[in-house]
Amino acid sequence: HGIDGYLNEEGCPAWRLRGYCDFGVMCRLGSCHINMSTGQNLRKTADECKSDASKDDDNNTETEASQPKVQLAIGHQNDIKNVISRDTMVKLRKSTYPFVCKRHFEVAKEKQKQKQKEDARVKEMNEEAPKAVDADREHLTATEAKSVGDATTPALPLKERKLIDFRNKVYIAPLTTVGNLPFRRIMKQFGADITCGEMALADQLLQGKASEWALVKRHPSEDVFGVQIAAGHADQYTRIAEVLTNEEGFEIDFVDMNLGCPIDLVCEKGAGASLMLREKKLRGSVEGLTKVLNCPVTIKMRTGWDEKKNFAHNLVPNIQKWGIEGIGAFMIHGRSRLQRYSRLADWDYIAQVASSQSSDYPKIPVIGNGDIFSYNDYEETILKRVGEGGDTDNMLLPTAMLGRGALIKPWLPTEIKERRHWDISATERLDMLKDFVRYGLEHYGSDQQGVNNTRRFLLEWLSFLHRYVPVGMLEVLPQQMNHRPPQNMCGRNDLETLMLSKNCADWIKISEMLLGPVPEDFQFVPKHKANSY
């Protein structure tokens, strides 16, 4: 597993895929596309891009390589979808984007100004014609109130809403930091049906932050893809929906509202789990999204704020009674906000929520989430509760929504679909990491910054991967999510032992096998280190 052999085998991913590397001499893997004598960044011909094996004679190759072809100068992310245009980014940063929906404080100021104008006008005309003034005031109030209401509702053209069938699918939940595009490509290789981007903060998106807009990017292999947005105000959701709808080339199958993030920084803004506590804001947010978007809107929430006072079984039927069209599904994480990820998910309560909707209104499907770590978990926690006892009120879908289980066992979709426990070898897992590194270099770039980003996300992923205990070493099947392996556990070979290590230094060693040595002062601390397992 030497770095030299790996790099010789793989080379620059952009050169291998598209015949040209944007990074030129800055590429860390550039020996395959840089003329060392002249420093020229070479470019493959169209024939070479189709097949590296079938080449013309050396003279023709050298001649064509020396003649740049503009049509082959493709950006290293040319195949990535949902890339926001530079013009839109500039408008967002300069606050010049032509939004139809106004901010909540702008609407409040307008109402206050209109009231002041109305009072002044009434005061001036009060002595002359009281009756005329009363009629005029009623007409003025109705007209101006209507204008204010119209300003908060985007008048966009009506579009046919696309539908998504979540039943019998494996859905990879939004995973902050680790659920990046290269990771989602790995999950698609292992059989995932539906993927969703990482949680994006609406206020950061509206400020034109490039790092935040990178979270909505989509790879062509993601055939059903959603975007998750977290916001604390209805106008933020509506404005984001306007940008997503107006931007050309954006392909989004559904938008997921985040009502489950337990992080203090998010909840303090009124977003995440705290939005569950503000039904008026929530209703305005759902209405704003559904009026603008032509795709379904899903709502991901927790059981409540405190596990002693769950209220999702009341919130779900309330949302149902609002009668808002376009809600594709509720997604219930079986823990409260204060629980975060400690203790087991409450699947009995998820089933209760799924049966809480009224028969007087159109019912909305419910997808459960929490602690699915094997096909046994999927069958015992979900399939047994779907339509349990012939209950027609139960809206729980047979959907496998995977979170931490996908991080620890990326091959879990294969296990669920094939109903087996896969004793995957350490070599196969290393090949999986090789694919991740290749996808990372393709996505983040092969220059030093791209290598650093790929290494960081690889290490973040390894902080979860080490929790997996090989099937052949277990005394009892299957492994449970909350089971901690013994200290200093040894595998069946050296590589497997290395992958079982909880030591960050060993994770860095694995990254060095794939991306070369790190600087002497390099250190790594997992971003999502938690007490819960």
Image (cartoon, rainbow, N blue to C red):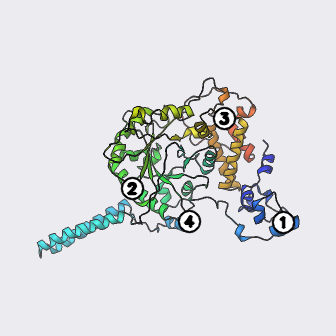
Residue 268 or residue 338, whichever sits in front: 338
Q: Secondary structure at mark 2?
A: helix
Q: Secondary structure at mark 4?
A: loop
**Number of the label disc, if any, that sits on residue 296:** none
Q: Secondary structure at mark 1?
A: helix
**Amino acid bearing label 2:** Ala
Which quarter shows the N terminus? top right
- The image shows residue 260, relative to residue 35, as above or below, that is above
Q: Which residue is found at the position 16% from the left and 70% from the top?
A: 135
Residue with the mark numbered 3: 503
**Number of the label disc, if any, that sits on residue 85:** 4
Instruction: For marks 3 and 1, give the one nearer the viewer.
Output: 1
Marks 1/4: CA–CA distance: 36 Å
Instruction: Identify the mark nearer the N-term, 4 or 3.
Output: 4
Q: Which residue is found at the position 54% from the left and 49% from the top?
A: 198
**Amino acid bearing label 3:** Asn
**Amino acid bearing label 1:** Thr
**Res 63 visible:** yes
Marks 2/3: CA–CA distance: 44 Å
